[in-house]
Structure formats: structure tokens, C-alpha cells
Amino acid sequence: MMPVATNAAAQLRTGISAIVRRFSLAERADVDCCGLTVAQAATLEALRPKPQRLGALAQCLGIAPSTLTRNLARLEAERLVAREVDPKDSRAAKVKLTAAGARAAARVEEQELAFAQSILDGLGSKRSHEVLDAVSELLTAVRDATEGCCPGAFEFLMEDLPVRGEGPRRSRDGECCTRK
């Protein structure tokens, strides 16, 4: 028998869902004004650190290779990404941002950061630090809660998040993207 959710658990779930929805709406508005879809913006963002192999990029984005192929075809047609031969394996290809793709990804990121900054500004300096610490703790708790069913599955989402007293986390293989 499944345990009944506590009021606090229900409140956490509802609050997180509302935040996710609000950030998703803001993200859609940000990418729409740049002439991109959310999927295209996520692809550009994933490629910002460095070119990636198609399989690693699909895995990082959590999409099927066929979906990635269609997405990349549109981005290539807009000259936002280009394929290059993988220097480590001439049979494989990597996808990289073009200069125009890097500018588009930077515009979207600037808008998303401005939205996040407006939220922090509304909280004030002291409260912002408290909230950011709490978010870091929450993400760690979420990662820990997923370890029982999906060991390591949450790690790539933690890569760029600072851990108290440490710098940003990085992926073990260096191939996965750095998602928000």
C-alpha cells in the first residue's frame, strides 16, 4: 500500500509544478522572440560548451535520435549548427554551433537570466542567498531520492550547480551537455 502524501509533500509538489510551469512559459516566450522553438533553443544551449556527437547530444536532451535528426535539419537550414567529422573517429560526426548559432543561444540565455535576475531582485539580497541555498539543498535531495531507482541518472543535471564549498560539478565523461 502506498503511503498517503503529507500536506508538506503535496505543498512541495504543487509549488515545484507551479515554478516549472512559470519558467517554461518564460522560456517559450524567450525562444519565440528569437525565432526558435524550445527544442531548438535547448539544442543550441547543449552545444554551447563544445561540439557533441549525435548520440551523446540526443541522450543529453532526452530525445530519440530521429527527433534530434529532424531538429538538427531545421537548425542546419537556418545555419545555426553545422556537422563536422569527429577527429577521434572519422566515421562519426559531431555537431557544433555556427557563429550565428552561438549568438542565438547567447540571446536566449541572456533573456532567461534576466528573468531569473528579476525574481532574485524581488526577493532582496539576503533572501536570494537563502533561496539559492535552499534550491541547492533541494536538488541534492532530489538527486539522492533518485539514486535508489536510477543510480547516476540525475548527475548530468547537477553538473553546473555549485555544491556548498565547492565549484561547479562536471560530468564524468565530459560528453554530456550542461543543462540548467
Image: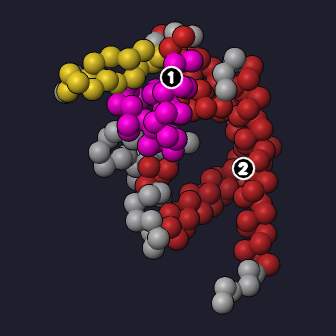
Q: Residue at coordinates 33% horizontally, 16% vertically from top-left?
A: 84
**Residue that numbered label 2 is attached to:** 20
- In the displayed structure, would residue 10 be above or below residue 135? below
- In the displayed structure, would residue 108 be above or below residue 59? above
Task: Give percent across and percent down for residue 97.
Answer: 45, 18
The furthest residue to the front: 66
Magenta residue span: 45-74
Compare residues 66 and 167 and report the one nearer the observer.
66
CA neighbours of label 2 inside 10 A, class few (<14), some (14 to 19), many (20+): few
Within the magenta stretch, is there residue 54? yes
Task: Give percent across and percent down for residue 81.
Answer: 47, 16
Q: Residue at coordinates 77% horizontally, 38% vertically from top-left?
A: 25
CA neighbours of label 1 inside 10 A, class few (<14), some (14 to 19), many (20+): many
**Residue that numbered label 1 is attached to:** 72
- In the displayed structure, would residue 45 be above or below residue 138? above
Compare residues 10 and 66 and report the one nearer the observer.
66
Within the magenta stretch, is there residue 147? no
Q: Residue at coordinates 49% horizontally, 50% vertically from top-left?
A: 157
Q: Which tag, 1 or 2, sits closer to the chain's start?
A: 2
| Residue type, numbered disc 1 | Leu
Task: Determine whether, in the image, residue 85 is placed left or right of residue 112.
Answer: left
Task: Determine whether, in the image, residue 113 is placed left or right of residue 72.
Answer: right
Q: Which mark is residue 159?
A: none
Q: CA distance from mark 1 to mark 2?
A: 26 Å
Specify whether residue 98 is in view.
yes
Compare residues 1 and 153 and report the one nearer the observer.
1
Q: Are marks 1 and 2 in contact (CB under 8 Å)?
A: no
Q: Magenta segment, principal secondary structure?
A: helix
Specify whether residue 126 is in view.
no
- The secondary structure type at the circle numbered 2 is helix
Task: Give percent across and percent down for residue 87.
Answer: 21, 22
